[in-house]
């Protein structure tokens, strides 16, 4: 391996001391991911490297499309090996892309393979890693435990089956798997399949019944350990009157389509309703803002949701977010909230807004979430840390997550931890902060693990 050395991303001795003495050893609490809980429960050995590494990972799919790879070798009918070889050829020249780093670290950490990923080495990597998979009978449990994961929150829709989590809890795993409550498919009233999703909740034909069913479902989640929820919005809409939202819901349940203004009315009200509900049950809210989804309608029809055709939206609706938080705060119904921002030009606007709604009920009650999705790369993480420290308090920060469907994504936590330690290391060596490494190391450990454990009441 020519480029990922022991001191990767650590530019001075102070950064190295912070990482190796404090950050590296901390467990991982992955408080937002998209791992399939059924796969974790069944815990079947994997058959080949493609199944672990490429299946379902739209980060990698996007990179391949950017390189002009035919869709047959991404999501089509090519063999697993052909798809893997195509990815290796793609990655070999993807200098600067985070996958260029992550994939190489994943290969080393999980399979003990130190070959550089490129077209020339692809066959050897395929053979070596597949032999390792078979010899070691790799399963989801083994991959998660080898990453030193203590807890992970999957992201589950309101109608998902909670018995899977009850069965996982009976397993002799060294980590806990807990669902985060998500009502996006109930909120996205404009979706073609909306009424199909509502039907999965039973006899729900008016807003009263919908609100009752949402609360009942949340209670079922709480019974299996849920302490977090998730809301994903392209933009935050104004809070609308309940009777207007009820009219829109009735119209949609009657089989009629809704226009953009009606969609905003319904989403504006339901966002407010969900926040109040989460506050009542002391459920922390992860609010993801700024993804413009399903841009390519041709590929949406062909492949479905979450296949790599989303992008950064322009409107982060800071005024509407302010009015939402203010009204909830006035009503004593603002829950602990992590705001994830996908548009970097809005970093400071969001960071300064969350500082207006802190209180002593929790350290860092309103969090500026870590660099997310298109921003969870070296530049995005460094910029996030700069903006967070400039106008906030990094000592309260709840740290990194994976936001991934891949069981191999946990090295991303250490990618972040190296960047964090380098950030502190450079400030220390520049004389900009205390040089007491035992003190700073404790802050590093808190950011890597303890702060999120306390925030989510684990």
Image (cartoon, rainbow, N blue to C red):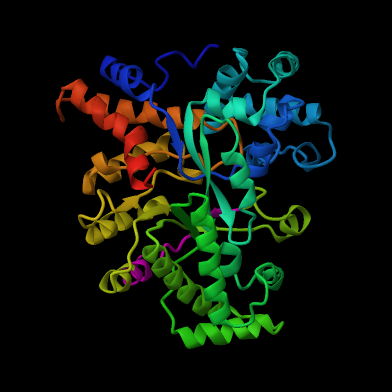
* Magenta run includes residue 393: no
- Residue 93 is at least partly visible in this image: no
Q: Position of residue 377 (x, y in %)?
A: 46, 36
In the rendered image, residue 191, in percent from the top left (x then y), is placed at: 66, 69
Q: Which residues are magenta?
A: 310-324
Q: Quadrant of the C terminus?
A: top left
Instruction: Residue at 57% x, 24% y: name it.
Output: 106
Number of labelled discs?
0
Q: Quadrant of the N terminus?
A: top right
- Left or right of 70, for residue 339: left
Quadrant hosting residue 251: bottom right
In the rendered structure, the answer to whether residue 153 lies left or right of residue 319 reads: right
Above or below for 337 versus 408: below
In this view, the residue in front, 377 or 245, is 245
Is residue 310 in sight in this rendering? yes
* Percent x, y of residue 364: 27, 49
> Based on the displayed image, in which of its 4 quarters is residue 446 positioned?
top left
Which of the 4 quarters of the picture holds residue 274?
A: bottom left
**Observer-nearest of 263 and 118:** 263
* 206 vs 395: above or below: below
Residue at 69% from the left image edge and 73% from the top image edge: 195
Front-most of residues 407 and 203: 203
Across and down, in percent, residue 386 comes to 29, 40
Is-magenta flag for residue 323?
A: yes
Name which residue lies at 34% across and 46% down: 455
The answer to whether 250 is drawn above or below residue 69 in the figure is below
- Residue positioned 43% across, 33% down in the render: 378
């Amino acid at each position: 391996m020519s480029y990922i050395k022991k001191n990767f991303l650590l530019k001075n001795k102070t950064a190295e001391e912070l990482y190796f003495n404090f950050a590296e050893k901390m467990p991982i609490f992955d408080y937002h991911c998209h791992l399939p809980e059924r796969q974790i429960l069944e815990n079947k050995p994997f058959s080949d490297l493609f199944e672990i590494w490429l299946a379902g990972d739209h980060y990698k799919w996007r990179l391949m499309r950017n390189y002009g790879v035919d869709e047959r070798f991404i999501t089509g009918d090519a063999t697993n090996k052909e798809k893997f070889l195509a990815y290796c050829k793609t990655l070999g020249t993807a200098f600067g892309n985070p996958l260029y780093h992550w994939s190489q670290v994943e290969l080393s950490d999980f399979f003990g393979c130190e070959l550089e990923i490129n077209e020339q080495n692809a066959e050897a990597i395929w053979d070596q890693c597949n032999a390792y998979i078979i010899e070691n009978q790799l399963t989801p449990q083994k991959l998660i435990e080898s990453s030193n994961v203590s807890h992970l929150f999957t992201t589950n829709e309101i109608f998902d089956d909670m018995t899977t989590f009850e069965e996982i809890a009976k397993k002799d795993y060294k980590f806990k798997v807990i669902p985060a409550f998500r009502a996006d498919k109930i909120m996205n009233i404009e979706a073609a399949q909306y009424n199909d999703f509502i039907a999965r909740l039973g006899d729900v034909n008016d807003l009263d019944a919908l609100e009752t069913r949402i609360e009942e479902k949340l209670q079922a989640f709480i019974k299996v350990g849920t302490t977090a929820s998730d809301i994903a919005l392209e933009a935050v809409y104004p809070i609308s009157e309940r009777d207007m939202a009820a009219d829109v819901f009735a119209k949609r349940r009657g089989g009629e389509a809704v226009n953009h203004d009606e969609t905003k009315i319904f989403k504006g009200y339901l966002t407010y309703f969900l926040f109040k509900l989460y506050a009542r049950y002391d459920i922390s809210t992860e609010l993801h803002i700024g993804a413009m989804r399903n841009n390519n309608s041709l590929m949406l029809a062909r492949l479905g949701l979450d296949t790599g055709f989303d992008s950064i939206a322009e409107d982060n609706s800071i005024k509407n977010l302010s009015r939402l938080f203010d009204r909830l705060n006035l009503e004593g119904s603002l829950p602990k909230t992590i705001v994830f921002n996908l548009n970097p030009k809005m970093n400071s606007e969001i960071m300064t807004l969350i500082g207006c709604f802190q209180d002593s009920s929790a350290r860092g009650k309103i969090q500026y979430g870590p660099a997310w999705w298109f921003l969870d790369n070296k530049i995005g993480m460094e910029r996030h840390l700069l903006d967070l420290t400039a106008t906030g308090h990094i000592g309260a920060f709840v740290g990194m997550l994976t936001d991934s469907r891949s069981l191999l994504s946990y090295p991303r936590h250490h990618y972040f931890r190296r960047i964090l330690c380098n950030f502190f290391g450079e400030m220390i060596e520049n004389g900009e902060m205390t040089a007491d490494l035992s003190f700073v190391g404790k802050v590093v450990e808190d950011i890597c693990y303890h702060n999120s454990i306390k925030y989510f009441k684990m």
